[in-house]
Amino acid sequence: MKDNNATVKNWRSRLHEIIYEADTPVGKWFDITLFILILASILLVILESVASFDREHHQLLYISEWVITILFSVEYIARCLSLKKPHRYIFSFYGIIDLLSTIPLYLSFLFPGSHALIVIRAIRLLRIFRILKMIKFIGEASKLKDALWESRTKISVFIFTMMILSVIIGTVMYLVEGSAAGFTSIPKGIYWTIVTMTTVGFGDMVPLTALGQTISVIVMVMGYGIIAVPTGIVSAQFSRQSKLNNIHINTQACPNCNAHNHNDKAEYCYNCGNLLNEA
Amino acid sequence: MKDNNATVKNWRSRLHEIIYEADTPVGKWFDITLFILILASILLVILESVASFDREHHQLLYISEWVITILFSVEYIARCLSLKKPHRYIFSFYGIIDLLSTIPLYLSFLFPGSHALIVIRAIRLLRIFRILKMIKFIGEASKLKDALWESRTKISVFIFTMMILSVIIGTVMYLVEGSAAGFTSIPKGIYWTIVTMTTVGFGDMVPLTALGQTISVIVMVMGYGIIAVPTGIVSAQFSRQSKLNNIHINTQACPNCNAHNHNDKAEYCYNCGNLLNEA
Amino acid sequence: MKDNNATVKNWRSRLHEIIYEADTPVGKWFDITLFILILASILLVILESVASFDREHHQLLYISEWVITILFSVEYIARCLSLKKPHRYIFSFYGIIDLLSTIPLYLSFLFPGSHALIVIRAIRLLRIFRILKMIKFIGEASKLKDALWESRTKISVFIFTMMILSVIIGTVMYLVEGSAAGFTSIPKGIYWTIVTMTTVGFGDMVPLTALGQTISVIVMVMGYGIIAVPTGIVSAQFSRQSKLNNIHINTQACPNCNAHNHNDKAEYCYNCGNLLNEA
Amino acid sequence: MKDNNATVKNWRSRLHEIIYEADTPVGKWFDITLFILILASILLVILESVASFDREHHQLLYISEWVITILFSVEYIARCLSLKKPHRYIFSFYGIIDLLSTIPLYLSFLFPGSHALIVIRAIRLLRIFRILKMIKFIGEASKLKDALWESRTKISVFIFTMMILSVIIGTVMYLVEGSAAGFTSIPKGIYWTIVTMTTVGFGDMVPLTALGQTISVIVMVMGYGIIAVPTGIVSAQFSRQSKLNNIHINTQACPNCNAHNHNDKAEYCYNCGNLLNEA
């Protein structure tokens, strides 16, 4: 009985190694295969949405869809089995996404319309970030994330200010322009304000009165200038980050006078002339 | 008589504490309620402007409008009563906004059209910034404001240059394109120039002649490049700001005169000449 | 004879002082009047271009036009007379602009169509920068100009690369999309590429084929990313500039050990403890 | 025989000097001529595409086309002959482009449609960068390239994230808006997402439903904010670069071992421990 148990344990830990780790060759191979499968499944969903393509290759798409769904189902079950406490995976963000990206096709037997839900699979693309752990890219990504996270309060204040401005300006534009120019309600006005302030400028709603155009000009110049704020925040953050990194590159201190900030190639202290590394 | 006076004073100072301060639990509770009321009042104005929604729920909106107006009126009166010299509040920016956001509904009995003025209420959203004093966000907000304020002359020069450029280019485009492309007057040309230079590009007015399109290309590249200027200004400002903050990281204080802000390498106090670290 | 000559000299130098300098009260008054006159002349040109306004107030505009033209003519003659060698002014940039902004109205007697040239007057707005000499704004403006001038080679390389890219992409789009989508010639393609790359996006020409849309996506992401380059250049320039400024703020050096970079408030050297200012 | 061989060598090395180097007057002259010829050939292709111009000056364009093609062919042959191992040039990027920009006209005798391929010539514009070697611009260009190259991983992560976001948002918009608003397939949705996120905003596809417009607002604000990331990356890179350059400003070299790049405050050589300034 104990032996059997050990075998199960062995089998489970090996599966775990393959699925959740990327250090072994098999683990790497699994991750790359999964990466390709996810890309393929996204491509399938995209191609299926192109009416002309779907008409010609419907059979092919249908079969591929099923193949990928079954493979994903197997992967889901394997992920559950390989863990001692699978509930932690099942109720995690990725666990739910993994489940949701297999279910829709099964559901479509019961409820015809539910096939559209297959699109949730697109969220699986996020798993790519997890797979990328093996590459050094993740380091840079976490730097980016850190910089954005560090400046989160500044950015929140900024977005909050923009929201209030949008409501006020959107309301004013609704009163000034009215429904002739498409400003049929305040939400429409807010939508237009954000379209304009972010310099997107679709042109679906456009001020027609002189006053409306004058306000637009102010909104545009404001939006054009305001972009400096998030950019400035993130730039300063990156600059600081890269400075901090520079400091960590070289922690050498003189054994005699303890001066810091030596050149990377320094052999002698610039302050007292002592040898830096007395071997 | 004196006792009664004291009671009034007590009552007034307690009211003041609740309304103007956020340190006590009641004060906090008041601020949060006000915050929610303002949001609700804005939402009401927005929903009212949506024709289909207003048609179905007109009664509900009408009653809510009155409830909020009465609550705002009570708040306004309480604010006046809680101060010894209420005229300082009444004629302050917030005082006027607070008054203006209650009046329109009352006025609508006398003048039917004046109801639209209720939109002034949107400006009350700015009060949110004052309420946010309690959160640490305000620190970041003031940093943002400082950075923008510090670079105000640079930004003014920039906006001024852009305005002159817009007038010149707008005039040229009016002459080049003429009314066929919608450039019916110089103001229209200036409007188009700003729409283009800020990279908004609505597309409501578009150059049709080869010369006009050539000028457009120059305006666009200029606008695309010019954005670097405000961004650069604000970035540099943020960088400097974060550097100034870095100086405070060194928390060394002179054991003799308690002066702060020493250089990172300082060995002697810059204020009294005392050794900083008497080992 | 000599006396008369001296009077002329006196009279000329006084006129010069008034017109070209802004230190005396009369000089300041002259500059401000000129500033207002230029603004008024621009406003006139702008209002004249608005058909509805011109129809109603034609007489008023016509008279104001003449008044300003005569004042500008007097100013032009005064500028010439006040200089010993007026040809240096006459053939300078401002001299030519000043002349060109008075001539059109006179010419309109001989050639009816030439009145439109009055628009050259808009260029006189640039004189505002010269008038602003009196305010401290000019310091900031020259900083901006310096930062842009310092990065001129970097910016040239950038604009040059963008031009080459536009020609290549514009040509490709002309081949891919053809005249159905409005890409009737390569210049049109280049125009579209710049409209897209600078994120203006008028929407007057839009890719219709799948291939064209795919290329568009690349162009857009490229344009969206490329903006980082001029912004980065100018930001770095501003940062460097503000750093250089910081250094110049405090040039104090210890009289004993000659250490630099003392705190602004430092009284004792941080390096040797010597008094910094031995009075 | 040997003599003859030497003459060939001489002749080849002289040709090589003219074509590939820009130090001699003839080499400079060759480069400038080539520069002008490439510009002229591009101009020809552009003018040819303008239907009205082509109709009037067809003969002129036809002859110029042939003249330039023959000159380019001669240049191509000369480039091949001037090298001992011409295959390294022939199969290089520039070699292939040079060949491809001469062939189409010859091919057009055999296959009528192939004339359009002449557009490949636009890529020859890239050669301008090589010609510019002679100017100091190349230094700045390489700095730009370095800065972009250094931040390549950060930028890749950024573009990758944007791509994933576009797929997810594009899919959602396809489901929300449907074909009424032009979202006929997921690729169309992705195209719209990128048009919106990069703040281009053509306006050819525009959300019509309230939900779609709400999502648009989020996409726009996101796109507006996200631009801070590449800008921040490149700004920080430029700042760092200009700081590294600053180190080189200190031109102190050790009098003993001639090591460079000493700290600004260094008194002893970091390489040999020698005093830097033996007074």
Image (tube, coloured by chain):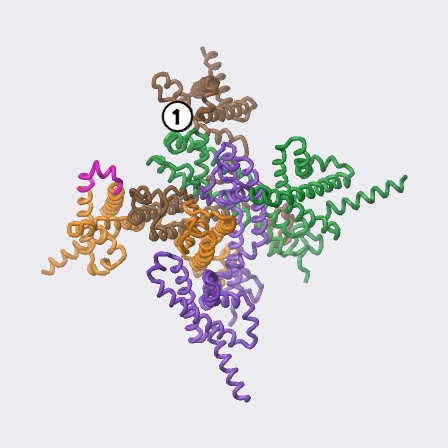
Chain colours: A brown, B orange, C purple, D green
Q: Residue, x 74% and y 45% (percent of image)? A: D19
Q: Is residue B142 magenta?
A: no
User: From the viewer's perspective, is residue D232 above or below residue C275?
Assistant: above
| Type of the residue with mark 1 | Ile
Q: Is residue A131 visible?
A: yes
* Residue C127 drawn above or below residue D127: below
Q: How dense is the environment of label 1, judged by Cα within 10 Å: few (below 14), some, or many (20 and up)?
A: few
Q: Residue furthest top?
A: A1
Report the magenta residues as a range. Answer: B49-62
Query: In the picture provided, is C146 more to the left or to the right than A103?
Result: right
Residue B59 counted in the magenta span: yes
Residue in the foreground of this view, choosing between D18 and C182: C182
**D174 relative to B27 in the view: left or right:** right
Indicate the chain on which mark 1 is placed: A
Task: Look at 52% across and 23% down and name the residue there.
Answer: A33
Q: Is residue B250 visible?
A: no
* In front of the other: D178 or D196: D178
Q: Nearer the viewer, residue C108 or A232?
A: C108
A173, C57: nearer the viewer: C57
Q: Position of residue B72 (x, y in %)?
A: 20, 49
Say left or right for D62 vs B122.
right
Q: Which corner quadrant holds the N terminus of chain B?
A: bottom left
Outermost residue, right side: D1
**x and y percent of residue C63 in the render?**
38, 68
Q: Main secondary structure of the magenta part?
A: helix
Residue for badge 1: A96
Residue C239: percent from the left, percent from the top?
Answer: 51, 54
